[in-house]
Amino acid sequence: MSELIEQFAHIIEQSSEEDITILSDYLRNFEKKQQGEFSTYLSASLNMTRTLDDQSSVVSIPNTAFIHNTMAIPHGGILAVLIDTAMGTLANSKCPEGFSAVTTNLTIHYLSVADEASISAHARMIRSGRHTMVIEGNIVQEDGKHIATATGSFFIIPKK
């Protein structure tokens, strides 16, 4: 434990203001995960918010340096996680009791660079069958700018 405390103190000493902000946000969300406000460490680390209704789901994350690549823009892999999470949330909400949906295919087209404070992935069902689902997703930012579009296929499997 003392090694961890020393490491943490060293990190803080070497940190910029931006580093401290990102670390503080991460730790706040880590605590929320411990308290059950987030279901996974991934959703906590990205500070995801989710809304779900009968026809669609929306997952949003802040556009901060935490998700940026070396060009200081949102990393394409993070955007793929965002859109897959929105589509997977919708897919899982449609599964019968005792079943779950897993992604079998994700095709994403990046259209523009996000440059506002928040980005959201919106998902809607295209087809829902007994064994598979096809879902469409779009990432937009607050001003409506279209960032990416995707389709995903999901296979329905029994929960373990």
Image: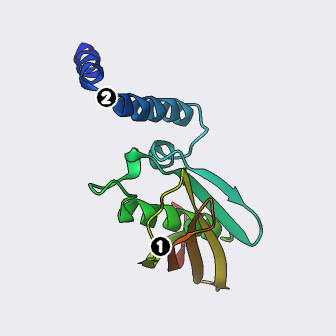
Mark seen at residue 103: 1
Q: Quadrant of residue 126?
A: bottom right
Q: Amino acid at mark 1?
A: Thr
Name the residue nearer the viewer: 74 or 89.
74
Q: Quadrant of residue 52?
A: bottom right
Q: CA distance from mark 1 to mark 2?
A: 38 Å
State the colouring used for the structure image: rainbow
Quick check: 152 above or below 75? below
Image coordinates for residue 29, horizontal then vertical, percent:
51, 35
Image coordinates for residue 124, horizontal then vertical, percent:
66, 76
Q: Is residue 89 left or right of residue 110?
A: right
Q: Is residue 2 left or right of residue 59?
A: left
At horizontal 50% and vertical 61% (from top left) the residue drawn is: 82
Mark seen at residue 16: 2
Image coordinates for residue 116, horizontal then vertical, percent:
53, 55
- Tell me if mark 1 has few (under 14), some (14-19) or many (20+) residues whose alpha carbon lies within 10 angstroms of its own: some
- Tell me if mark 2 has few (under 14), some (14-19) or many (20+) residues whose alpha carbon lies within 10 angstroms of its own: few
Quick check: 77 above or below 152? above
The quadrant of the image that shows the N terminus is top left
Say which element carries label 1. strand
Say which element carries label 2. loop
At horizontal 39% and vertical 45% (from top left) the residue drawn is: 66
Is tag 1's residue or tag 2's residue first in the polypeptide sequence?
A: 2
Give yes or no for contact between labels 1 and 2 (Cβ–Cβ under 8 Å).
no
Mark seen at residue 75: none
At horizontal 50% and vertical 67% (from top left) the residue drawn is: 84
Image coordinates for residue 20, horizontal then vertical, percent:
38, 28
Quick check: 3 above or below 146? above
Q: Amino acid at mark 2?
A: Ser
Name the residue nearer the viewer: 98 or 9.
9
Please indicate, yes or no, whether residue 100 appears anywhere in the rendered image. no
At horizontal 64% and vertical 68% (from top left) the residue drawn is: 90
